[in-house]
Image (cartoon, grey):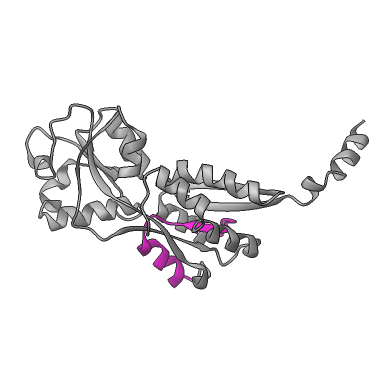
Amino acid sequence: MKRLLLLLLAGLPWLASAQPLTVSAAASLTDAFKQIAQRFEATRPGVTLRLNFAASGQLLQQIAHGAPVDVFASADPGTMDRAAAQKLIHADTRRDFASNTLVLVTPPGGAVKSVRDLARPGVKRIAIGKVASVPVGRYTQQALQAAQLWAPLQPKFVFADNVRQVLDYVSRGEVEAGFVYRTDADLAKGKVSIATTVGGHAPATYPAAVVADSKQAALARDFVKFLDGVQAQAILANYGFGKP
């Protein structure tokens, strides 16, 4: 029986030609990339995408330590710059495919309405991404430095491992406010409220590139190009991402 099963499986052409493609992407891309992966698989019979989501800096460290990744999609140009400097990507494949907006969010009915309100005594805890590894944390730092609030607010900061953790802290009411992307805030409607859009930081653009050690380089290039296509761009727009 076991031998018969093996023979039957061996005779299935889709199984014999199955091609796994591993994509490591910023946490804020989770929902959009799950849908994009389905569309890409539909155009490539036999291809299976394996998606790995985390903070961009954490993903870069994984790649640097030899994780088997084919495509890297970062939430900021700086992290991709470091990947290029370490020769971890094929620089000629790099392209920006989306953009985002930084917003300040609160639990529903929160008293915070502006960045300046964060300095009030009633605000005890503010969630932000870890500056060293989470791009939204760096955008937050830039914005608060521009507003001359970074140093005064530091005692209130609750650091998160990625943008979705910031969102969780706010939605559970564990902090009075937090900084996330608008796309994340939109996914949590009813659980968080957008107090204001935050400026004073570098543009939040998303680059993708083929990883240098990819064993599926041609397929990885196809996926990066797919991100610029009509189907992927429509999905990204539906989740609130802007053009790069």
Left or right, 41 with respect to 52, comes to right
> Which residue is rendered at x = 39% and y = 61% of the image?
79
How many marks do you count on the picture? 0
Quadrant for residue 190, please give it: top left
- Residue 160 in view of the camera: no
On whether residue 87 falls in the magenta region, the answer is no
Left or right, 68 with respect to 45, comes to left
Residue 117 position, x and y percent, is 9, 40
Residue 48 position, x and y percent, is 65, 47
Residue 99 position, x and y percent, is 35, 55
On whether residue 75 falls in the magenta region, the answer is yes
**Image: 1 above or below 154:** above
> Which residue is rendered at x = 36% and y = 52% of the image?
242
Quadrant for residue 163, please give it: top left
Residue 154 position, x and y percent, is 16, 47
Q: Residue furthest left?
A: 121
Between 168 and 222, the residue placed more toward the observer is 222
Between 78 and 13, the residue placed more toward the observer is 13
Say which quadrant the N terminus sits in.
Answer: top right
Residue range (magenta): 65-86
> Which residue is rendered at x = 52% and y = 42% of the image?
35
> Which residue is rendered at x = 46% and y = 48% of the image?
234
Left or right, 29 with respect to 67, comes to left
- Residue 94 in view of the camera: yes
**Image: 107 above or below 154:** above
Q: Residue furthest front?
A: 230
Say which quadrant the C terminus sits in.
Answer: bottom left
